[in-house]
Amino acid sequence: MEVSEYIEQFAIKINESLKMQTFVKISLGNYRGNEEGLKQILVRRVIIKRDDKLALTFRYKTRDIVKNFALDEGIQMISDYLDNGFKIATLITTQNDHILEELINKKIVFRTIESSNKKLPELSHDKEKERLIKPGSKAYLNALKITDTEGKVYKNAQDKFRQINHYIEILSSLIKELPEGTISKVADMGSGKGYLTFALYDYLHSVLKLDSEVIGVEYRKDMVDLCNRVASESSFEKLKFAEGSIQDFDANDVNLLIALHACDTATDDAIFKGIKANAELIVVAPCCHKQIRREIEQNKVKNDVSFLTKYGIFLERQAEMVTDGIRALILEYFGYKTKVLEFISDAHTPKNVLVVGIKKNQKSLVGSPINETQKEILQKIKDSKAYFGIQYHHLERLLGL
C-alpha cells in the first residue's frame, strides 16, 4: 500500500472520530521536513463562537503557534504534513488509539490499540470564566435580546454580556466593603433599557440572597414601560422602573445609588441625591463634562498645563479629570472613602471611568459643623478652581459649599 493510502486511512479515522464524538487529540512527531525549527504538531478540537474547529499547535524550538481551522481544512492540513515531513502520528479517541508510523527501513505501520484516554476533553477555546451573571433560562436576558430562547448568548451580544458581568463584578467587590445586609434599597438613575439594572437585581437576589428593592429611574416612557413589563414577566417583584428625572427622584432612603453615563451635570445631580440620602455606596460613571470645560475655555487662565490645553482633545481630557477629581473631593468632604476605577472599554461604553464613594460611618455630615479635614478639602477645591479658572463646580453649588 502506498504512503498516500495510509495517510488517507488515517484521515478517515479522524473524520469518523469527529462525527462519532469520540475524538480526544492528535499528535504529530518525528519531523523530517524542511520547515526550520518545527518539532511537533498537537491537535485538539475546540468550539469558537459556536463553530466546531481543529486547533493546531505548531511547536517550534523557541515558540508555539496556534492556528484554528475548519474541520475539513484541519484534516487536510494534517494529511499534508504527514505527506511532507512527519513520520509518526497518533490519533487518540475514547474507543481506540490509531498510530501511523514510518519506520527507519521506510516501512509504513498503521496499527490500532486500546485507548489511552477514555475521557472527552473540554471543547471551550479558552477556559470559561466563572461569571456572576450566567446565561441560561433567564427571562430578562432573552427579552433584552442578550440570549436566545435556549439561553445562549447571541454573537452580537457577547460584548454587552461581558460588560454586564464586569459591572456586576465591580459592584460585588464594592458591596463586600459594606456591613452585611446594608443594601436594602437601590436606585439606578438613568437606567435606560435596564440591562445593568436587571443584572444587579438578579445578583442581589439570586447570588447574595438579599431582599433588596431596586428602582430604575428613566426619563423615556417607552423604556420605563418596556422594563416594567420585562420585570413582571421575570417575576422580579421588587424591581420597578419609574418615569422621571434624576432631579425629581426622592432618594431619601436609598442605600446604593448608581448613575451610569448621566450626561454632564446630571451626574452631579445623582451624587447630590446620594449624599443627601446618606447612601452607603454611590457609584457613577460620568459622561460629557461640559460644564467645567466651558469654565476653563471662557476664563483661559495661564498655568503649567496651558501648552497642553491649547489642543481641544487635551482640554477635553483635562476637563474630565478636573471635573471628576473635584467630585471625588466633595465626596470625601462628606465622609466618603473614594475610588476612581476603570469601568470597561468597548463600543457600548466610550466613557469608562467609575467614581465611587463608600460611606466610612453612618453619620451624615450634611449640615454638621466643619472639621479640620473638611477645611483642608475645601482649600484644595478652591485652589484647583483658581488654577484652572473655574468659577464654580455644579455639585459644589448644589451642596452649598
Image (tube, rainbow, N blue to C red):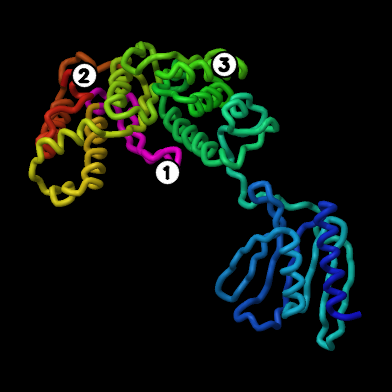
Q: How much space separates mark 3 and mark 2, taking CA atoms?
A: 37 Å
Q: How much space separates mark 1 and mark 2, taking CA atoms?
A: 32 Å
Three-letter amino acid code at disc 2? Leu
Relative image position of residue 399 (x, y in whole percent): 21, 19
Magenta segment includes 89:
no
- Which residue is tagged 2? 399
Three-letter amino acid code at disc 1? Ser
- Which residue is located at x 83 percent, y 57 percent? 17
Relative image position of residue 201 (x, y in whole percent): 52, 22
Label 1 or label 3, whichever comes before in sequence order: 3
- Which residue is located at x 49 percent, y 37 percent? 163
Residue at disc 3, secondary structure:
helix
Q: Quadrant of residue 92?
A: bottom right
Q: Quadrant of residue 242?
A: top left
Q: Residues within 10 Å of mark 1 (few under 14, many from 20)?
A: few
Three-letter amino acid code at disc 3? Arg
Residues drawn in magenta: 331-360
Query: What number is the disc on residue 345?
Result: 1
Nearest to the eye among marks 1 and 2: give it.
Answer: 1
Residue at disc 1, secondary structure:
loop
